[in-house]
Amino acid sequence: MYGVIGCSKLIGVNSGFSLVLEVALVPIVVMSCGHNEVAVAMAVVNLWNPGSVPPATNSRLSPLPPEPADYDRGATVDIPLDSAKDLKKKEKELQAKEAELRKREQELKRREDAAARAGVIIEDKNWPPFFPIIHHDITNEIPIHLQKVQYVAFTTLLGLVVCLLWNIIAVTLAWIKGEGPTIWFLAIIYFISGVPGAYVLWYRPLYRAMRTDSALKFGWFFLSYALHIAFCVFAAVAPPIIFKGKSLTGILPAIDVLGNHVLVGIFYFIGFGFFCLESVISIWVIQQVYMYFRGSGKAAEVKRDAARQTVMAAL
């Protein structure tokens, strides 16, 4: 696009001399128009193709680089003016969360200290590893000179589980062979009551007695473990007292069913062996625990506590 400015008539290029100046990439043509009149004749600006006009060779100003092809003239730049306020706000929020976490940590520590002073021990369930239901850590919590006895006691707990589980299998086979469903229901009751009962009544008291050296817990263990041994001996014999004794895999029902069903008799004899082994190991455990109990002076401590309680009750 061409424009002619400040001339009384259109002047051609041949009517005078011309001088080309370049200022800010806008070419200006100055021409003579008469003797004393000088006018700016033409201003040429190419708005649509700025790169088509070659720069002047005698210009002191370096030309601007061409705009990139992907430049968006209408794009806006969002400059956040309240960034400092946002940073302060986030800093305050982080400080508030940190103070809350510190407060919770102090409260948890206070509760743990109070529980420790009261003799309450917080136990995390960690056994069995695939489905933790009890707390069990002999290596880290039981004194090293008592760990062997504790491990053997734990073996008797697992042995009782095996004995009662095998008892269910053998009694189920006897039921299939025509012995009736009553003995099977009794075998189920032995298992679902015997396994958790053994853990609560004698294994956990022994574990805590070994860990805390408590004379009271030792006394409770002796009472409960004696009942456990009595049950194992009774199951190994299985006299015909309860439903002819066939709800337990003892020696007497094994001999009884062997004449009619050889396979059932073999299963009952295997159960008899399990109960015998469980009884022998359990007797060894209670003997070792009692020897430690006597040697550590806990027996005398129990006698003194019993005498003190008797005197207090009399007064």
Image (cartoon, helix red, strand yellow):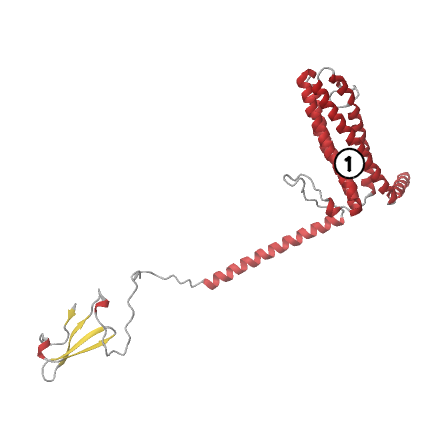
Residue 238 x/y as whole percent? 78, 22
Residue 216 x/y as whole percent? 82, 41
Identified at 15% across, 69% down, the residue is 2
Q: Nearer the viewer, residue 152 or 120?
A: 152
Mark 1, Cα crowd under 10 Å, few <14 / some 14-19 / many 20+, is many
Residue 86 appears in the figure:
yes
Identified at 71% across, 25% down, the residue is 167
Which residue is label 1 attached to? 202
Give the position of the N terminus as an image quadrant. bottom left
Q: How many marks?
A: 1
Residue type, numbered disc 1: Trp
Q: 32 left or right of 257? A: left
Residue 21 x/y as whole percent? 20, 77
- Quarter of the image where one finds residue 265: top right
Dot 1 lies on which element?
Answer: helix
Identified at 51% across, 59% down, the residue is 90
